[in-house]
Amino acid sequence: MEILLVSYLAGTKSITKKYLSKMVSNKIIFIPTAGNVEPYTGFIDEGIEMLKSLGYELEIIDISKFDEDYLKDRFLKTECICISGGNTFYLLQELKKKNLVDVLFKRIKEGLLYIGESAGAIIMSKSIEYNQIMDDKSIASELDNYGGLNVFDHYVLPHIGEYPFEETAQKTLDIYQDKIPLVPINNKEAILVDNNGYTVLNESKK
């Protein structure tokens, strides 16, 4: 198992390029669903353009718009899945509505190349409840359980010190740092997780 968890996909181009260099094909399933409830989604477009600039072909799938069988089939057949940022609670709600959590967990354990940006990184933790300061959980009215995929035994805290999340990210750190093992990262950092633990990488120290 080896997954890449980032704060801002477009800000980690060289790290992402190195991580994806082990791909056999050049096709990535890109999931923008977390952005469905966000007023600003420019970061999604930037992430898409960055991956395309590296020569990858993207199949963009909004999981809220497809049926469960189709989505499971795509998840089972792809070599790489990238889930971008937005509202973490809405993203987890949509994954659970289509019964994709166990499928994604199993594929990651089998060696699927997974990139999670912000919300897509946070859902790898045991629970996403800690992110309620940064994200509005009331948007996900059908989500009754905050249990994440539990792939990563720490808790990603993206956008530390980054506009417009300076206050909410810092408040999350202040409240939860003594309660759960947080790993804060800024928009130029990424967390590479494997079976031996994790390493924080920095785009400017390639």
Image (spheres, helix red, strand yellow):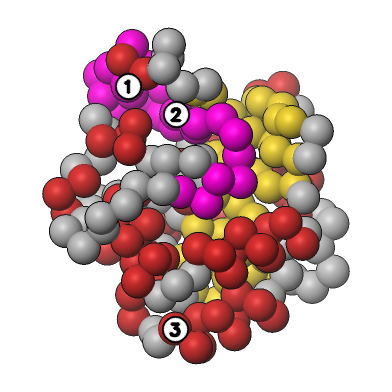
Contact flag, marks 2 and 1 (Cβ < 8 Å):
yes
Does any portion of residue 118 appear in the rendered image? no
Q: Is residue 189 positioned above or below 110 on the image? A: above
- Give percent across and percent down for residue 112: 72, 62
Q: Nearer the viewer, mark 1 or mark 3?
A: 3
User: Under tag 2, what secondary structure?
Assistant: strand
Distance Cα–Cα, label 2 vs label 1? 8 Å
Nearer the N terminus, badge 2 or badge 1? Answer: 2
Mark 2 nearby-residue class (10 Å; few <14, some 14–19, many ≥20)? many
Residue indicated by mark 2: 157
Distance Cα–Cα, label 1 vs label 3? 34 Å
Distance Cα–Cα, label 3 vs label 2? 30 Å
Q: Which mark is residue 106?
A: none
Contact flag, marks 3 and 2 (Cβ < 8 Å):
no
Nearer the N terminus, badge 1 or badge 3? Answer: 3
Residue indicated by mark 1: 172
- Give percent across and percent down for residue 193: 70, 38
Mark 1 nearby-residue class (10 Å; few <14, some 14–19, many ≥20)? some
Front in this rendered view, residue 81 or 128: 128
Left/right of residue 102 with respect to residue 2 in the rendered view: left
Q: Amino acid at mark 1?
A: Thr
User: Under tag 1, what secondary structure?
Assistant: helix
Q: Amino acid at mark 3?
A: Glu
Mark 3 nearby-residue class (10 Å; few <14, some 14–19, many ≥20)? some
